[in-house]
Amino acid sequence: MTTHDPQPSDTELKHESRDWLLVFRYELKIAIENEDKESYYYFMQEIIKERVKRETGQDMDPNPSLIFEK
């Protein structure tokens, strides 16, 4: 059924049903294609934080110090 008067609540983001790893990997791919180092670093951090959260059930520091070797 189509609603002809959509409301913001109809498209509310549900964090619990979102596969954040999938979203972050997609964004990381785009950052690589665009040679965007800042976005690459940001989304790599987010991937690592999400994996730690899934594996341990604990959140990491929101701004962890990560070093990527060339």
Image (tube, grey):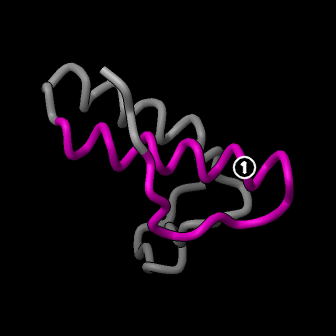
**Taking 1 as reference, is 4 above or below it?**
below
Q: Residue 14: x, y in percent?
A: 64, 66
Is 38 in the magenta? yes
Q: Chief secondary structure of the magenta span?
A: helix
Magenta region: 37-66
Name the foreground residue: 16 vs 33.
33
Position of the N terminus, as image quadrant, is bottom right
Q: Is residue 29 left or right of residue 38?
A: right
Q: Residue 61: x, y in percent?
A: 58, 69
Name the foreground residue: 18 vs 7.
18
**Taking 33 as reference, is 41 above or below it?**
below
Q: Amino acid at mark 1?
A: Val
Identified at 85% across, 60% down, the residue is 57
Identified at 44% across, 48% down, the residue is 66
Position of the C terminus, as image quadrant, is top left
Q: Quadrant of residue 36?
A: top left
Is 63 in the magenta? yes
Q: Is residue 37 left or right of residue 15?
A: left
Q: Residue 35: x, y in percent?
A: 14, 26
Identified at 25% across, 44% down, the residue is 39
Identified at 19% across, 37% down, the residue is 37
Q: Residue 50: x, y in percent?
A: 64, 50
Q: Quadrant of residue 28?
A: top left
**Residue occupied by mark 1:** 52
Q: Is residue 35 left or right of residue 8?
A: left
Tag 1: Cα neighbours inside 10 Å, few (<14), some, or many (≥20)? some
Q: Secondary structure at mark 1?
A: helix
